[in-house]
Amino acid sequence: MAGRALRQRRRASRRAFDQLWKSGLMTRRQAYRRFQVKLGLPESEPCIAGFSEGRCQLVIDMCKRFLGARDRAA
């Protein structure tokens, strides 16, 4: 069972991921695919619910970079 810190990290990574695809920068499917490639995940494992704290933080950081690049380009 996931501890409190891990559950909080998963929620934060889900919020960051949702913010990314809801921004219109890419579709949800494209975002999942991008993370699969960037994190070296098999197609069967893109689900944040199974991620470790470290992997969740990578998702958060990547979302911030994508959104930051979009904001700088605007």
Image: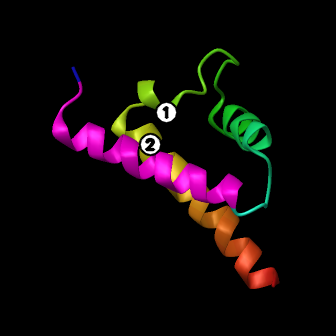
Q: Nearer the viewer, residue 18 or 73?
A: 18
Q: Residue furthest front?
A: 22
Relative horizontal placement of residue 16, taking residue 2 as reference (left or right): right
Q: Which mark is residue 48?
A: 1
**Residue 26 in the image: x percent, y percent?**
80, 53
Q: Is residue 43 above or below residue 53?
A: above
* Image quadrant assignment for residue 24: bottom right
Q: Residue at x 24, y 27 (%)?
A: 2
Q: Residue furthest left?
A: 4
**Residue 73 in the image: x percent, y percent?**
81, 81
Secondary structure at numbered mark 1: helix
Q: Are marks 1 and 2 in contact (CB under 8 Å)?
A: yes
Relative horizontal placement of residue 9, taking residue 70 as reference (left or right): left
Q: Is residue 56 above or below residue 1?
A: below
Relative horizontal placement of residue 46, taking residue 5 as reference (left or right): right
* Image quadrant assignment for residue 68: bottom right
Q: Is residue 13 magenta?
A: yes
Residue neighbourhood size for the residue with mark 2, other residues' Cα within 10 Å, grouped as few (<14), some (14–19), many (≥20): many
**Residue 55 in the image: x percent, y percent?**
46, 38
Residue neighbourhood size for the residue with mark 1, other residues' Cα within 10 Å, grouped as few (<14), some (14–19), many (≥20): some
- What residue sits right under mark 2 in the picture? 56
The magenta region covers: 2-22
Q: Is residue 27 magenta?
A: no
The quarter of the image holding the C terminus is bottom right
Secondary structure at numbered mark 2: helix
The quarter of the image holding the N terminus is top left
Q: Which mark is residue 14?
A: none
**Residue 5 in the image: x percent, y percent?**
21, 43
* Image quadrant assignment for residue 11: top left
Q: Residue furthest top?
A: 44
State whether the magenta stretch is mostly helix, strand or loop: helix
Q: Amino acid at mark 1?
A: Ile
